[in-house]
Image (cartoon, rainbow, N blue to C red):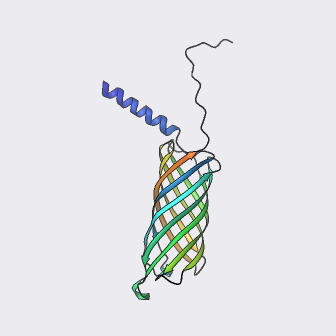
């Protein structure tokens, strides 16, 4: 009997937490994680991790946000062109549209924006390459202000028409924003008409 009561209390607590989970207007979101970059064959580079990745977003509404992100990488060129090391960074600024809560704690989204790859092959000849990017992803909230996220993003670089694909994942923390007012509590008093 005690186990049943404990289980019901635990489930009620989780439902209460997840019912309030999700993005909220005027909140800032800090995200940390990693990503795997599948380079365009035109780059002649080995696929690699973008580690770490970090992003900060500002929620304009529950659905709309603007986000700036950063990731760094270390890889090498294919042996056919010398096999030298390549390091670099990716910077993006994106608009996000979140579709709202599904099952009270899952929030899918789409994103699109512009960015810059800073690529430095062999420690010399650094290049800044502008790009446009778009992607889809989702956040899964475990608390009102903590979520895991995953995304797939297509990055198209104008220089040489290169198309890279990035799979990203990580954890997000929300700070601030509107808090819904607490529900009124009635203590068994009858309301007179």
**In front: 105, or 69?**
69
Whether residue 94 is situated above or below residue 182 in the rendered picture? below
Whether residue 101 is situated above or below residue 120 in the rendered picture? above
Whether residue 95 is situated above or below residue 100 in the rendered picture? below
Q: Where is residue 172? Give x, y as percent.
A: 50, 52
Question: Number of marks in the image?
Answer: 0
**In front: 119, or 4?**
119
Q: Where is residue 186? Give x, y as percent.
A: 57, 19
Taking the spot 50% from the left edge, 59% from the top edge, the residue there is: 151
Taking the spot 60% from the left edge, 36% from the top edge, the residue there is: 180
**In front: 151, or 117?**
117
Whether residue 132 is situated above or below residue 16 in the rendered picture? below
Q: Where is residue 47? Give x, y as percent.
A: 43, 73
Residue 128 lies in what quarter of the image?
bottom right
Question: Which of the image's four quarters has the N terminus?
Answer: top left
- Residue at the extreme front of the image, as rendered: 123
- Residue at the extreme right of the image, as rendered: 193
Q: Where is residue 41? Give x, y as percent.
A: 48, 79
Taking the spot 50% from the left edge, 66% from the top edge, the residue there is: 71
Taking the spot 55% from the left edge, 70% from the top edge, the residue there is: 155
Question: Which of the image's four quarters has the C terminus?
Answer: top right
């Amino acid at each position: 009997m005690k186990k049943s009561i404990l289980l019901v209390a635990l489930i009620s607590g989780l439902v209460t937490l997840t019912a309030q989970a999700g993005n909220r207007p005027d909140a800032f979101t800090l995200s940390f994680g990693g990503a795997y970059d599948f380079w365009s064959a035109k780059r002649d580079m080995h696929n690699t991790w973008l580690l770490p990745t970090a992003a900060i977003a500002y929620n304009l509404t529950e659905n709309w946000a603007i986000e700036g992100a950063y990731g760094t990488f270390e890889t090498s060129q294919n042996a056919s062109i010398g096999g030298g090391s390549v390091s670099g960074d990716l910077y993006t600024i994106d608009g996000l549209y979140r579709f709202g809560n599904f099952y009270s704690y899952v929030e899918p989204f789409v994103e699109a924006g512009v960015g810059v790859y800073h690529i430095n092959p062999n420690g010399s000849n650094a290049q800044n390459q502008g790009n446009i990017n778009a992607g889809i992803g989702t956040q899964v909230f475990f608390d009102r202000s903590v979520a895991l996220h995953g995304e797939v993003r297509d990055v198209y670089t104008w220089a040489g028409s290169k198309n890279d694909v990035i799979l990203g994942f990580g954890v997000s923390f929300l700070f601030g924003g509107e808090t819904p007012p607490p529900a009124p509590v009635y203590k068994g008093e009858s309301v007179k008409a």
